[in-house]
Amino acid sequence: MRMFVAIRPPDHVIEDLDDFLAPRREASRLRWTHPDTWHLTLAFMADVPDRSRDELEERLGEAAARRRPFDLRLAGGGAFPDPTRAKVLYADVRADDPVELDRLAVGARNAAATSGAPPDGAAFVPHLTLARMNRPVEATRWLRVLGAYDGPTWTVDEVELVASHLGEGPRNRPRHEPVATFGLVATRESRHAE
């Protein structure tokens, strides 16, 4: 089963970004992702064996419990692999404590790997995917547009394990099914004790 570990922005953050993008979407031939699917992927697992699910959930719970809540906001943007031949356009993620965000991602990826569901991808790059392109495009103009965006701050206090069902959502989009939620419960004092 395709699964990922994610931070989901709260509704007011999604609405703010959606309102910013709405007038710009119609002037573009980009394939925009739907706001219902917006998330920040910490770890993506293309194939989680059924036998690994329980251990994955247990290890993710342990990894999340070692992290403390922190603030995030979406601001600016970027493109993969680069702005001159972009295939993905994204909103940039700004953390008040980037080290805590990185540790959360490392913990999620380690939990996946040690439970028999190795994560895909190389280095963690915090982002929220906004659009995809069938062919590479010059995206410098879009990066200037996104550069004007500075969204509201929110506190991340949980992560989700989500099953991704390709083609089962509206308009053949993926359907995301939350499987489990894990709280970030460590305090600053308990983090210093590690």
Image (tube, grey):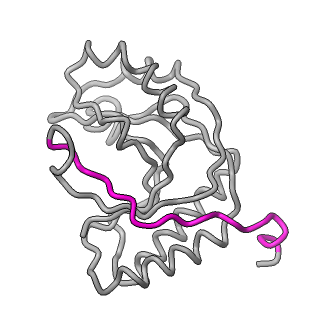
Up-down relation of residue 95 to residue 178 (above or below): above
Up-down relation of residue 98 to residue 188 (above or below): above
Up-down relation of residue 100 to residue 10 (above or below): below
| Stretch in magenta | 172-192
Up-down relation of residue 36 to residue 126 (above or below): above
Q: Of residues 17 and 88, which is closer to you in this image?
A: 17
Asked whether residue 121 appears in the rendered view, the answer is: no
Rendered image quadrant of residue 13: top right
Q: Point out residue 143 in the picture as x, y percentages from the top left corner.
A: 42, 24
The answer to if 180 sits in the magenta stretch is yes
Q: Residue at the spot x=47%, y=60% of the render?
A: 160
Asked whether residue 29 appears in the rendered view, the answer is: yes
Drawn side of residue 107 relative to residue 114, left or right? right
Q: Residue at the spot x=67%, y=72% of the render?
A: 66
Q: Residue at the spot x=26%, y=15% of the render?
A: 26
Q: Residue at the spot x=55%, y=31% of the render?
A: 75
Q: Point out residue 32 in the picture as x, y percentages from the top left corner.
A: 28, 31
Q: Point out residue 11 in the picture as x, y percentages from the top left corner.
A: 51, 37
